[in-house]
Each structure stands twice: as C-alpha cells, then as structure tokens.
Amino acid sequence: MDVGTLFHPRSIAVVGASSSPEKIGHEVMANLSRFDGRVYPVNPSADGELFGEPFVESIAAIDDPVDLAILAVPAGAVPDVVAECAAAGVSAVVIYAGGFAESGAEGERRQERIAETAAEHDVAVLGPNTSGFVIPGDGLLGSFASGIDELGAGDVAVIAQSGGVAHALAFQALREGRGLSAMVGLGNRVAVGFPEAIRYFDAHADTEAIVLHVEGTDRGRELLEACRAAETPVLAYKVGESDVGDFAESHTGALTGDHDLYVAGFEQYGVPTVSSTTELLDGATALAGGPVPDGPNVGVVTAQAGPGIIVADRIQRAGGRLPSLSDETEATLEELLPGITYADNPVDTGRPMPAFGDVVATVARDDAVDVVLVYELYEASIGLPVDRMEALVEAVDKPVLFATDGPDADVADDAAALESLGVPVLRTPERAADLAGVLARYGALRARDAADAEVVARE
Amino acid sequence: MDVGTLFHPRSIAVVGASSSPEKIGHEVMANLSRFDGRVYPVNPSADGELFGEPFVESIAAIDDPVDLAILAVPAGAVPDVVAECAAAGVSAVVIYAGGFAESGAEGERRQERIAETAAEHDVAVLGPNTSGFVIPGDGLLGSFASGIDELGAGDVAVIAQSGGVAHALAFQALREGRGLSAMVGLGNRVAVGFPEAIRYFDAHADTEAIVLHVEGTDRGRELLEACRAAETPVLAYKVGESDVGDFAESHTGALTGDHDLYVAGFEQYGVPTVSSTTELLDGATALAGGPVPDGPNVGVVTAQAGPGIIVADRIQRAGGRLPSLSDETEATLEELLPGITYADNPVDTGRPMPAFGDVVATVARDDAVDVVLVYELYEASIGLPVDRMEALVEAVDKPVLFATDGPDADVADDAAALESLGVPVLRTPERAADLAGVLARYGALRARDAADAEVVARE
C-alpha cells in the first residue's frame, strides 16, 4: 500500500460535497479551496458548482484520474462508495464517518467490507472515524474542522489515533505561533495505520520530528519497528493509564492495552513517551529545530532559587539527571561571581545580573552537561542575555532552554529573539522542566543505543 | 505578633532608598509610588528627594509614626537597622537581603539577632531573603521586582516560601488576565511564617482562596492548624519530592523534609496538594470565583472522543471519580441524541451539535455529579453553548469547566463569555483535567469532613 497519493495527491474528489455550509461536505470543500490541483465535488443530487467546480454525479463519472477520494457520506453508504472508488482506480480514500468497528456488530461488518476492498485493490484508506489530515505546506487541508486553515507550515508531523486529538494538537501549535508539517488523524486504521504513516513522514522532506498519539493498536510490533527504523526523532503520547478501556474501545475500536507495556516497548525501540499534549509538542519542536542531546544530564542555572528547586525536583522525577559540574566549571563560576549563592548544579546566582549569560555559558560548556535549562524571571534593567546566548548556541551543540516570566510587553522581544536562535522559551518552571525531561530521556536512549552499537562494532 | 501593620500599613520607610535606578532601593521606591500613605526614603548618604519625598537620615529621624520599614540594605547592616526600627516603634519590617540562615554560620548568627529583636519588641519581620509582598487592591507594592506594578487586584492570595515563586505565580496570573488579592514571599520566616500569613489572609475581605508554596518548615503543625481553622479554601504546592534537600536548604534555610508526610498532613487537615504552579492558580481561581464541589465525582461531556479519553484518564489518576449516571440521565441523553455515541460517563456526542448544551446540562443535573468537565473543540458554525451555560450555572451549584481550542480569533469571545459566567475555560485537555482533579480532591476532603462532623453530631 502506497500512502503517497493519500498525503500528496494530484487531484481530489469529495464524495458528499454539499452547498449547505453547516455540512462537513461543505467544510472540507472550503478547506480544500487552497489546494493546488483539481477538487471534484461529487454529489448525485446536487446541481451547479461548488467553489468554481461543477458537481459530478459519481466518482465513475469523472473523466480524469482521481488520486484521493474524501468521503463525507454516512456510514451506511461508505462500503459501496469505497468499492466504487476502487473500481474507478482511486488509490487513496479518507472516511470521516463513524459507525464502524467502534460501534457494534453492524459497524464491524461495514468496516470488514471496507478492509476487504482496500486489501484487494491496494487502496490507502485513512479512517473510518477520523476528521482527516492536513499538510499545511502543500495547502492540502483534508479536514472538515473549521479554523484549521489558519495552521501554517512547520517541521513537526502529528500522527494521532484520534482525529480530535490531532486537531487539538494542531490548534495548540497554532496558539503557540507554530506550524506543523503534517497533521493526521488515523481513526479506526482499517488500512493506513501508524507504521505506514511513520514511514511516510520519516521520509517527508519538511518533517524534522514526528509525534504519536496512541490509544491502542494490534500492530504494536510493526509500530515499534517503524519507530526504530525512523531517522527522524519520534516522541509518543500513550494515553489510557487508568481504566478507560470501555470508552476507548467505543472510540476507534481499540483497547488501550497495558500502559506500562507500551511505555516500556517505546523506550526499548528508542522512543521517549510523554504525559501531555503540551510536552509532546514542546519536545518535538525542540528536537526538530535544535541540537539533539547526547545524554540525560541537565545543567540548571537559575537566577531565583525557588523556581530552581521546582525545576531541579521535576527534572529528576522526569528521568533527567543533575550531574556534578567539573572543578574547572566551579572555579570559573567562582571567578565570575565571587561568593556565588550556590555553585553546584543547579547553579543559583541569587538574582539576575550582568554576568548571568556568562554563568549559563560556563555551565553549558561543561562536558558533563547534555541539556541546559535556565530560569530567570525577567528584570527590565537587565533583560535576558540574548547576545550571550547567540554566541553560545553557535559554540556548543546542546539544547539550551529558557524559562522566564514577567509582563508580556517586557518579555516578548527578548523571548522572540531567543526563540529565533533555537532557544525554546517557556513561561512556567514546570513546563520548562518537562521539556528538559523529554530531552533528557531522549538523550538517555541515544546514549544507550550508541553504547550498544559500540559493543556490536567491537564484537 | 500582629501582621496587620505589615500587610496594611499607614506609612512606610524604605531604608536603603536610592536614586540609582538599577538598585533595588530604587525599584521598591518606584513600586511604592502608587501607595496611598507616606513613603519615607531613608539613606544617610543621599540628599534631595526621591519620588517627591525628601531623603531622611535614619528611621529615628522620622517625626511621624512609621508602621512598616522595608530594608534594602546589605545583610551585614540588617541586624542593627532592625534594632533601630524596633527602638523607633516600627512594628513591621521587610528584609530583602540574603546571607542569613541559608548561608552558613555567620548568616545564622545574623538571623538569630534579628529573631531576638523581633521577639523582644514584637516586630512582624517578613524575611530575610525575600523579594517582598504586594497587595494590589491597596496599591501596596512592597517588592523590588520590575513589572510587578502591572498586576491587578484579584481574589486569590499567594503565600510562597520563595519570593521567586511568589513572583512567578504573580506573573503567571497576570499573563492569564487575572489579578491577586495578595502575593507574599516569606523567605527565611524569622518571624512571619505560614501560620500568621494564612490567618491574616483568611480574614482578609478581598481574599476568597489561599494558595501555599511550601519547601519545608519546622512549624508544620501550626501551619496545618491554621489551614484547618481557615474558612477560606486553601491549596498547597509542596515541592521537593526528589532529592533537592541540599539546594533547598541553601535557599530559605529549610529542609524539604519528607514529601509524602507533608502531602498526607495537608490532606488530613483538609488541604489538597497540587503538582504545578498552573494547577495551583487554576484551582484557586475556580474555588475563589465559583461554586465549591461537594464530592470527588466528575461528569465528563465531550464532543470529541480522543480528548475525552485523555481527560477521563487523567482525572482518575488525579484522584477524581467518574460516577455512573442515573437511569433518568441516560434516558434524557437518549432522547436528546438518539443513538448517541457513548452515553455513559464520559458522555461522547461524537461532534459539536446544537443539542450539546442540553447534554451538558443533563449531566450537570445528575445528583451523582459534583464537578462537570466539558471538552469541545471550537466549531465556527455552532460556537460554544454560552446561553445554555448561563442558565445552567444559575440552576446548579456545581463547578462547570470547559476545555476548548481553535484559532484565538474564533474562540476568544465565547471563552470570555463563559469565563464571565464563572465557567473556567482551559485550552488543553490536560490542564482542564488537572483542574477537575484539584476540585475533585477538594470535594473529597469536604465530603469526608462533612461525614465526620455528622458522626460527631450524632454521638
């Protein structure tokens, strides 16, 4: 099965296209109006045009080849339409409707029919029971959600079991001023599942990191193998730690399975797991845009001890380590700030001060440190050490994170300047610590795999 | 010891007031320029005026009574200045400087001297080693932090062991468009500690909820008794779960102690603990502004199953319960939405739809439900059910929370309308679930205490 025509089609047909603005067959046509190729509205009971294209009676009635059919029709009609698409040579289909394996025996039979058609004709079916996908960089909005046209291009691909979670992640990225390289809601995964999507976006030129939202899958091994084979960093959000099995099965037809087994499996295959949508996006954004850490060791520099304690505490609980700094580092810190408040890791300068940027740079250069986290409440007379960080990120190949807060009008410029250097700026100590934790766990897995590879090479 | 003149002084002296804008003795004078009463700049080596007030040579040289002295002088000078204040009849002192019990033997001796003076003359000393306090409603900004003058009045009082965390919470509130009734950084607590601050703000007319940031205290029992005696809801953020003891002791001179013991102690005395600054503020804002839950049972309504699973999972791990709904509720739901996707708790409508508000109201009216959490991605053609929620919050005395996301320009108006009804609107499923979790834990403790009281009454 080739998902290339699904995620990069030359032409699209929308079956169930509608002139009524409140219908999803209208919403998706509106969202597709930016698409580069032809978009055929298919509806046997409609006349005239929609977004400049004349309505067509059926897929079969379209003379030109159609790569992708998006089905905005009720569940009962889906199996026949899929068969019609297959017969017409359409190689990719998106199915929005619910009412399949997630909803009882009749739904299961319907889904079985689709699965058979897909297998027989090698059709890349996305769904059923999904709100679709978007590839913002191609202007391809295969989703019926309103507002998704605001999402810009980015370098993180979202592959979510739930279309709702996919959209929640997309809107969260938008709200943070970020874009995505792709957003995919897999739904019931009758044909296109995690393995196919991971392999595609691993090879996707615009994608620098992949995030997964996983409820449960019966293709766990293939999913993990695809993760291990990926050269692109992958992070996973496995949900369903407590008892939500019943409700989850009613969702995309999959049990959530044993949460700990999934987490251990991901880890074994080099994928750190996270505990929230925010952690997922923050982690992927950092891995996509900046240097990748070589180990789990976090150097913390803080200008205020209290938030520094919060950060140090949380990083360790998140799997990060706080290594001791070298004698050389400690000596340099003493030189920079004679009588420094606390010169171990975390390094506490007591207050923001002109030497603060140099303190950060000193800790960042310590070989024991893989990730640097800086906490500094914004002080107007000093600001954040943007120039010093610019020199630093050119000199050291490690992730450097900043946490700060203050009135937006004061903080915004310096924060934007740091972000543009590839230094993520977070606004609470916990969010910064969580990001450092993800990076530390990713670094730990890389260090483990590098050590394993060395052993193998020596044998 | 009366902290009334500390938190509600009629006149203030700033010892170490300075004309140099980069000095904290200048910053605090600038911040105090909004204060209603007299503010005397004290500095024996300065001439002229500062913010319209002539410099005074010493506390003793001020003719009128001074309620509060704010000390912006180095640690070495502090014990003598405190003694001078006490001799002049000043009944409250704030000490910014560090270099006391948190920093070795000499510092300990200095702190001991202050403690003796405070005890002998009954002086309410805040600090040392704190960035101060603010009471925005009184225009009283006893902090040297830049930007803190932007913080408006609100109904939550922040009492933090760390001045840095106090300010981080204040800036977070500001960024969320909220104010605070008070922000206090206790620092080394040589005189004013948690018990005094809790009792004061429990009686403070503008305070409807109190939040605590706790690293460690040797007055644990008194702290807990003050919490139990408070009529105002109290939430606590106990930090230091992993090994940060060394660094923490270097901060405000206190060990973080056994984290689990603190958490259990707080719970025993009716105070739920939280795991982040965000959860602390969200929880307090909800308890201050809205109805207080009677138990731990959360009714979840979602328009998208995936985020609903995240929410249901996380609420249960946070100590909330997802009760079964009554037969009557289920029947009403079936009437509202024949063939509803999932009519158990969580209730899943499959998509946003016109009946969505009625579904929420039906769940909210179920007696098994103490807290309602709604998840609904914003859909432009339908919006959020603001009118329906307005009727609901008038009819039921339970917290109702909304989680939504979408482009800001679309969501903002409806979200603001819900907020103004006392319905908190969160933008990620996890943040909403965490808030529901805090409320559920608070509700559980109330239910327990109510049951205990009934037993006592019957005996």
Image (spheres, coloured by chain):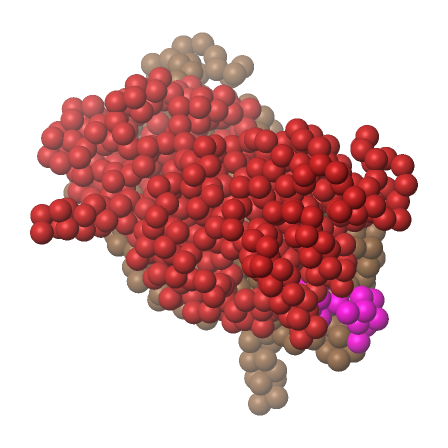
Chain colours: A brown, B red
Which residue is at the front of the view, B249 or A68? Answer: B249
Q: How many marks?
A: 0
**Horizontal and vertical percent position of residue B326:** 13, 36
**Which image quadrant is residue A243 in?**
bottom left
Looking at the image, residue A389 lies above or below residue B424: below
Q: Nearer the viewer, residue B255 or A171?
A: B255
User: Is B331 on the left or on the right of A338, as rendered?
Assistant: left
Whether the magenta-drawn stretch holds residue B350 is answered as no
Expressed as whole percent of the image width and height from the top left, the position of residue B47 reads 90, 41
Q: Is residue A343 magenta?
A: yes
Q: Residue at x 30, y 62 (%)?
A: A258
- Residue at the extreme top: A48
Instruction: Give the residue drawn at x 38%, y 56%.
Output: B224
Q: Is residue B255 above or below residue A198?
A: below
> Would you say B421 lies left or right of A67 here?
left
Is there any visible trace of residue A131 in the rendered image? Answer: no
Quadrant in the picture for the C terminus of chain A: bottom right
Determine whether A414 is above or below B256 in the image: above
The residue drawn where x is 30% and y is 19% is: B391
Q: Nearer the viewer, residue B154 or A179?
A: B154
Which residue occupies 37% across, 31% down?
Answer: B290
Q: Position of residue A330 (x, y in %)?
A: 75, 75
Visible residue check, residue B292: yes
Residue B75 appears in which quarter of the rendering? bottom right
Numbered range of the magenta stretch: A331-349
User: x%, y% of residue B147?
Assistant: 69, 38
